[in-house]
Amino acid sequence: MLRMLLALLALVIMVPVGAAAQAASGSNVTPAPRRPSDLWFDPTQLPSFTGTVERYLSNPRGEVDALLFREGPQVVFPPDVAEAVRQVAPAGRPIIVWGIRARTAPVITMLAFAPNGDATPVVVDRFYWRLAGRQPVEQAVRLAVAGTVKQPYYSPQGEVAGAILEDGTVVLLPQGAAEGFRDLLKPGAKLAAEGLGQASETGRALLAERLGETAEALRPVPATPAGPAAAPPAAPGPQR
């Protein structure tokens, strides 16, 4: 009981995400009311991971929901805290992350973060486990990408779910489809892909419908079974 009370007290004194973003930007705007956390424990009791942000990663919806440490690991977080994380630690700056590391892959689910050990950690108010929310939206456009694989793109549970190219482009595969393309998703492999996604100043990401070593050798990727998370109908005209 005492441990639970201490954990709740720690959550109460944590800085809300909105306030951290304002502090990082130097704004004098009055912080928005604190949003209650869904977590029942103090995330800073979890292991901490310190690294330098190499880049932020987009999903096929055009949202930023991950970062890549220069040291290698991927860190995933809900899209609604992306701006706060980016203000605390722009690309090229260090960040401390408290969270859960997958057992089989270098991917960390963020539950709190801070720019350094002297700053008050900011609590992320929920787990961000699933890939279903990263599917393209109706406004998605058809993209065609090609490049060299920097590293596999992992699900929060550590499963290979696609690839990150050297330029930061994310190529996501439908759930369960990566096994048939593992040779193309290894670091150093040449990869070309077509599918629906988004391209913006935050980066490019798509859900692959065709995949291959080159644009001339693309083959179909098995689609996700029909359901709420299935990709929308194809949009005309690939963008390169």
Image: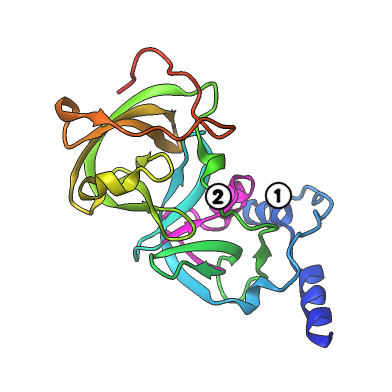
Q: Looking at the image, how many numbered discs can be counted on the residues? A: 2
Q: Where residue 27 is drawn, which disc sits there?
A: 1
What range of the chain is rendered magenta?
74-98
| Quadrant that contains the C terminus | top left
Q: Quadrant of residue 133?
A: top right
Q: Where residue 44 is drawn, which disc sits there?
A: none
124 or 118: which is nearer to us? 124
State whether residue 166 appears in this view: no
| Residue visible at 80% across and 53% down in the picture | 35
State whether residue 189 appears in this view: yes
* Crowd band around label 1 with a 10 angstrom C-alpha radius: few (<14), some (14–19), many (20+): few
92 or 214: which is nearer to us? 214
Q: Is residue 199 left or right of residue 42?
A: left
38 or 234: which is nearer to us? 234
Q: Is residue 127 left or right of residue 206?
A: right
Residue under label 2: 130
Hey, which residue is sitting farthest front in the picture? 225
Looking at numbered disc 1 in the image, what kind of residue is underneath it? Ser
Q: Is residue 145 left or right of residue 17?
A: left
Looking at numbered disc 2 in the image, what kind of residue is underneath it? Arg
Q: Residue 64: horizontal and vertical position, in percent?
A: 51, 43
Q: Quadrant of residue 112?
A: bottom right
Q: Provide the secondary structure element on which disc 1 rests.
A: loop
Q: Provide the secondary structure element on which disc 2 rests.
A: loop
Q: Residue 204: horizontal and vertical position, in percent?
A: 39, 35
| Residue visible at 83% across and 87% down in the picture | 2
| Residue visible at 21% across and 29% down in the picture | 218
In the rendered structure, does residue 64 fall within the stretch colored magenta?
no
Hey, which residue is sitting farthest top in the picture? 236
In the rendered structure, does residue 89 fall within the stretch colored magenta?
yes
